[in-house]
Image (cartoon, rainbow, N blue to C red):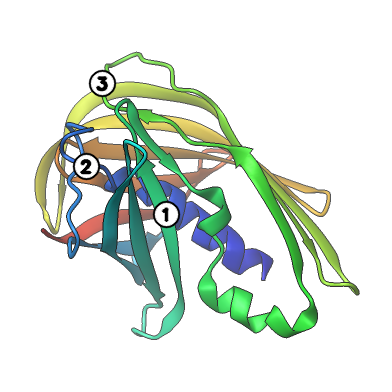
């Protein structure tokens, strides 16, 4: 369960940059029916699965736009391993994610008969509309506490040192894009076990996330994710 949650969290956080409304963000499109597909590669460059996203609903609430994203992850054999829905809010200044809706739906269903008690809190990830090279972005964090009676689990993730490094062109199976490169460090702790990773995230105007790479603390590549299909 821990591995499933952390995988879903990384994928979802990476793709928070997908959602925004055209009249509140110049970077990201938002229209019901818009789809994105990302292909994951392991450290040796081998296909390790795909994650697909579809905007299933978009509506205005109190001057903000709330979009529902359906996420489906399939392994390298094409077998669906989990699905989830989560919400992202677009404001006039940028976007923010609804942490409480990040939990994979299938995981919740799996443990619903075990009297699972869950508490999730944190500070939203901020991605402002106006990015510029050298810009420092605000830190973010998530804290998850799960109590299943016979077992308790605490997970914390801190995203720090977030910075816009540069602009560069990136080519994937979906095309060539002019991107901002954002770097950050993720520090997580699960039941007393600490882990630190760094990430690189490439964002394109009108598209969102184009590419993401995750590295161990020693600098070794863990995996990368690239936009392989896009349709709006």
Mark 1 lies on residue: 87
Q: Which quadrant is the C terminus positioned in?
A: bottom left
Q: Which dot, 3 or 1, sits closer to the camera? A: 1
Q: Residues within 10 Å of mark 3 (few under 14, many from 20)?
A: few
Q: Secondary structure at mark 1?
A: strand
Element class at badge 2: loop
Q: Residue at x 67, y 51 (%)?
A: 120
* Residue farthest to the right, as pictured: 150
Q: Is residue 119 visible?
A: yes
In the rendered view, tell whether residue 64 sits above or below residue 59.
above
Mark 3 sits on what residue? 130
Could you tell me if residue 45 is visible in this image?
no
Q: Quadrant of residue 17?
A: top left
Please, is residue 221 above or below residue 147 in the view?
A: above
Q: Residue at x 42, y 54 (%)?
A: 87
Q: Is mark 2 in CB contact (under 8 Å) with mark 1? A: no
Indicate the position of residue 29 as horizontal and vertical percent values. Answer: 17, 46
Q: Which residue is mark 2?
A: 21
Which SS class for mark 3?
loop
């Amino acid at each position: 369960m821990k591995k499933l949650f952390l995988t879903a969290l990384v994928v979802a956080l990476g793709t928070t940059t997908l959602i925004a409304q055209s009249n509140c963000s110049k970077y990201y499109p938002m229209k019901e029916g818009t789809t994105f597909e990302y292909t994951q590669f392991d450290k040796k460059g081998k296909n390790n699965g795909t994650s697909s996203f579809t905007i299933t609903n978009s509506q205005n609430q109190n001057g903000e736009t709330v979009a529902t994203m359906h996420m489906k992850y399939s392994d390298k054999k094409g077998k669906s391993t989990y699905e989830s829905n989560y919400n992202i809010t677009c404001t006039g200044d940028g976007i923010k994610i609804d942490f409480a809706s990040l939990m994979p739906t299938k995981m919740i269903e799996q443990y619903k008969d075990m009297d699972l008690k869950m508490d999730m809190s944190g500070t939203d990830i901020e991605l402002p509309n106006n990015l510029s090279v050298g810009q420092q972005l605000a830190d973010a964090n998530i804290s998850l506490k799960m109590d299943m009676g016979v077992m308790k689990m605490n997970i914390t993730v801190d995203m720090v040192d977030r910075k816009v490094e540069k602009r560069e062109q990136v080519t994937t199976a979906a095309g060539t894009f002019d991107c901002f490169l954002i770097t950050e460090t993720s520090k997580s702790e699960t039941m007393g076990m600490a882990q630190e990773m760094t990430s690189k995230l490439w964002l394109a105007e009108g598209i969102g996330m184009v590419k993401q790479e995750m590295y161990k603390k020693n600098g070794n590549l863990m995996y990368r994710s690239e936009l392989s299909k896009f349709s709006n």
